[in-house]
Image (spheres, grey):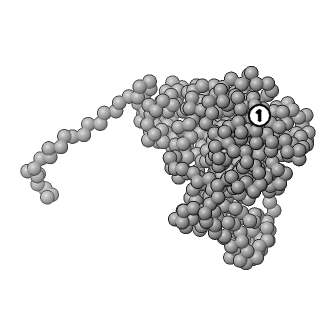
Amino acid sequence: MTGRRSRHRSTQKPIRVVRKPVRGLPLDVPALIARKRDGGALDDEAIRALIAGAATGAVPDYQLAALLMAIVWRGLDPRELGTWMRAMIASGDRLDLNAIPGRKVDKHSTGGVGDKISICLAPLVAACGVPVPMMSGRGLGHTGGTLDKLEAIPGFRTALSPAEFRRVLRGCGLVLAGQSERMVPADRRLYALRDATATVASIPLIASSILSKKVAEGTNALLMDVKVGGGAFLPALDDARRLARTLVRLGRGEGLEVVALLTGMDQPLGLEIGNAGELREAIDVLSGAGPADTRALTVRFGAEMLVLGRAARDLADGSRRIEAAIASGAGLETFGRCIELQGGDRRVLDPPHARLPEARHRHVVIARRAGAITALDARALGHAATLLGAGRLRKEDPVDAAVGITLLHKIGARVGRGEPLATLRYNDRRRFESARPLVERAFAIGAAAPAVPPLVRERITK
């Protein structure tokens, strides 16, 4: 009733909000979130305390998620970023690889659709004499993750202790693993949260996540593949270039030599999107086949890594060595040895790769009109693969290695009306119904085929 006070008083006690300080933090976490949200800078002590809280679990997920979103909007200045990255490294152990001969070189991608390059690249570089301690990640957002692809191999272990990491690297010249529980633990937690909270596309968060792991793993040099275009986390060329320069500068400050290549992601790389399918395609490249773009980028990246590892005079020499490792089967044999050492079944390498999982159902998407494919929406296709189960919508979601998309045509190809464009492989009907419209709309068909830009757009070393 308005205008009259009720005769019945509530017996509920007023709620008193108590903001408990997080142990070890100089300021309460909400105040730090608000400071960054409003455009302020975080001091070094606060950053170190926040990262320590992320590593130990003292700061809960909901506060970390809010902080990550504030950083996406407001960024980190160079001082903040340097402190953030060093705090990430200091949150756990560092690997000592000095007992393993040679200049260790790693490669990392900022994330692309159909990007399986690491799986065929690392064995080829190792076969040419450069040790590759590759610490990879899982899928983020609409992009696939190398670890998810490798775990399509029955028995393959990506969670290795530091001693196992060194043993595998010494045994075959490469190791393909994730972070150990004690290596950069702050990043393990933040990485999973970024995937599930739409906070991936941030230059400081991307750069610090990548480089903290690379410094901690004990590598000497790093090749960065920074994707640019519609399917990249940072589609604009200027943003990709800024990220590349940030990575080169940050790496140099920690004694890590970094070369960054800007590569196109306006359409998926190769023909397969999805974990088991992409693994098959990487094996095809090692066997001397595979799509032309996947093979070409593998050779170029391999040449860069051999130069960084002081095993090739220049890029031309490096390319010849990588091509020779493909032709001789040395790269494939090195991958097989790596699979064995990491507990996997190397029979996945044997055609027709029957040891890899297969989806129960298939659906073919056809062209609604005749013409040339003028565009192929990589982001939509990546999201469709995630909806099928190849990626995660929440950090705790399982990944279905069998599902995915096979592209039958790419930009520039001419197709007839009713001609197949792509095949969807699925196990769950509801997931398929969500993904199918995205795939159907991903293909744009017009009268004339467009010019396809080069795979490598720029090379950045400073």
The residue under the point 40% across, 28% down is 22
Q: Which amino acid does label 1 sit on?
A: Cys
Q: Is residue 368 at all visible to an observer of this figure?
A: yes
Q: Tag 1, which secondary structure? A: helix
Where residue 138 appears, as percent x and y from the top left, is 61, 44
- In the rendered view of the protein, which quadrant contains the N terminus? bottom left
Q: Is residue 265 at all visible to an observer of this figure?
A: no
Circle 1 sits on which residue?
172
- Name above or below for residue 256 compared with residue 176: above
The residue under the point 77% across, 54% down is 351
Where residue 349 appears, as percent x and y from the top left, is 75, 49
Q: Which of 41 and 346 is in front in this view?
A: 346
Residue 322 appears left or right of 193: right
Where residue 279 appears, as percent x and y from the top left, is 71, 51
Task: Tell me the crowding category of disc 1: few under 14, some 14 to 19, or many 20 or more residues within 10 angstroms, Cα based.
Answer: many
The residue under the point 44% across, 24% down is 24
- Name above or below for residue 110 compared with residue 84: below
Q: How many labels does the image show?
A: 1
Where residue 459 appears, as percent x and y from the top left, is 80, 42
Residue 289 location, quadrant: bottom right
